[in-house]
Image (spheres, rainbow, N blue to C red):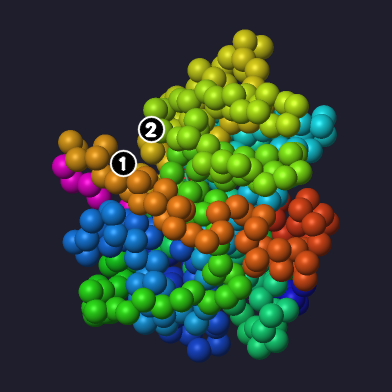
Amino acid sequence: LPAAAPEPLFAAYNESHEELVREALARPDLFNAVQFAPAIRFALAEDFGLSPQVVTVGRIVAALRRLGFKYVYDTNFAADLTVMEEGYELLQRLQGDGALPLFSSCCPAWVKFVEQAYPQLIANLSTCKSPQQMAGAIFKTYTGQLDPDLRSRHLFVTAVMPCIAKKFECNRPELGGSYGRDVDAVLTTRELAHLIKDKGIDWHSLAEEEPDQPLGEYSGAGAIFGVTGGVTEAVLRTAAEVVGGKPLEEIEFHEVRGMAGTRKVNINLGKEQLEIIIVAGLKNVVPILDDLIAGKASFHFMEVMACPAGCLSGGGQPKILVETYRGSIYRQRAASIYNHDRDLPVRKAHENPAIKQLYADFLGQPLGELSHALLHTHYTVRRSEENV
Ligand code: SF4
């Protein structure tokens, strides 16, 4: 791992993240890297008057380069990595090693809710960091192996997220290592749109560009993390093939899709019938947790996203000012995500060549020693008055 970076890179880490990013981009001693979340690529263009049905990955990459980011990577790559780690963690727990049911841990608002309101269930949370944090940890360590220049310079990692809770998450002291924080600053989708406009970048004339490789390469599994049910479907695509030992005939798990706040499904995983619950909207999870504690519920895996349709409806996304359009825009964003998945040449995380290369060259294996050091975390009992 690279030598320790002196902290803090900036005196006031708790100030506006947008200001922090502007300062970082102006500092010649820093290498600036950026990642952008699955749910950004369908929503950012709404702030420039385009429909949520327009996918603008290449244009986002171009805009980020015009803003001054030297390395433009993709959170979707780390979503694939999360699938690998969380998929193997699920299989390990099904074999009796660790608490069941396993709860997803991608959503920091949900994680904090468990820490504050249901601390007796902390052991059920996946130990996997979210894709945002996994991405930062990999950028700050593995890239030093890919590019020797990066060993002697500080890498400042910005994440563009649909989410305000992600700013809180990147400040959690346990989410980092000898290399400093996993992620240094988080911009919301709206803040990125504001920066692009403020710098006078003409969005409509930008030509598509490719992200930097290999940390910009992703599969359809990573792409669907932005919609409720997406994490579950992505994990199933990998877990089912690992258990079955052969390629799936059908990789789309339509049972887990939809916009209802609570969905309960049974999936055949080898000899096991896997009972899964998918929840969108925190209020919907309360009766399930209460039943679980009272011994009235039993299941294997639960995905929880705090926002009503998953990250595509996050609090940092472009505002939908007319209430009655909200459901229709969420559905259009979800359709764009699934269409994008269908258009990608690789649709399973474990088949992403960059993920295979990362394990072969650096991490070793899912849940291995280095994975545990960089990609997994622990949780803390919190008082309910602690702020986001
Ligand atoms: Fe953030 Fe909402 Fe996504 Fe949770 S569901 S990570 S709060 S945008």
Q: Earlier in the sequence, mark 2 or mark 1?
A: 2
Image quadrant in which you'd find residue 350: bottom right
Q: Please give the range of residues in magenta.
A: 317-322
Q: Tell me if residue 378 can be seen.
A: no
Image quarter hosting the N terminus = bottom right
Where disc 1 sits, the SS reads: helix
Count residues near mark 2 (Cα–Cα under 10 Å), then give few for <14, some for 14-19, many for 20+: some
Give x and y (percent) for residue 192. 34, 66
- Residue 30 is drawn in which quadrant? bottom right
Q: Is residue 380 above or below residue 65?
A: above
Q: Amino acid at mark 1?
A: Arg
Mark 1, residue position: 331
Mark number for residue 259?
2
Tell me what residue is drawn at x 71 percent, y 67 percent: 358
Q: Are marks 2 and 1 in contact (CB under 8 Å)?
A: yes
Q: Looking at the picture, how far across and down is residue 140, in whole percent?
A: 65, 71
Q: In terms of depth relative to the viewer, which is nearer, 157 or 36?
A: 36
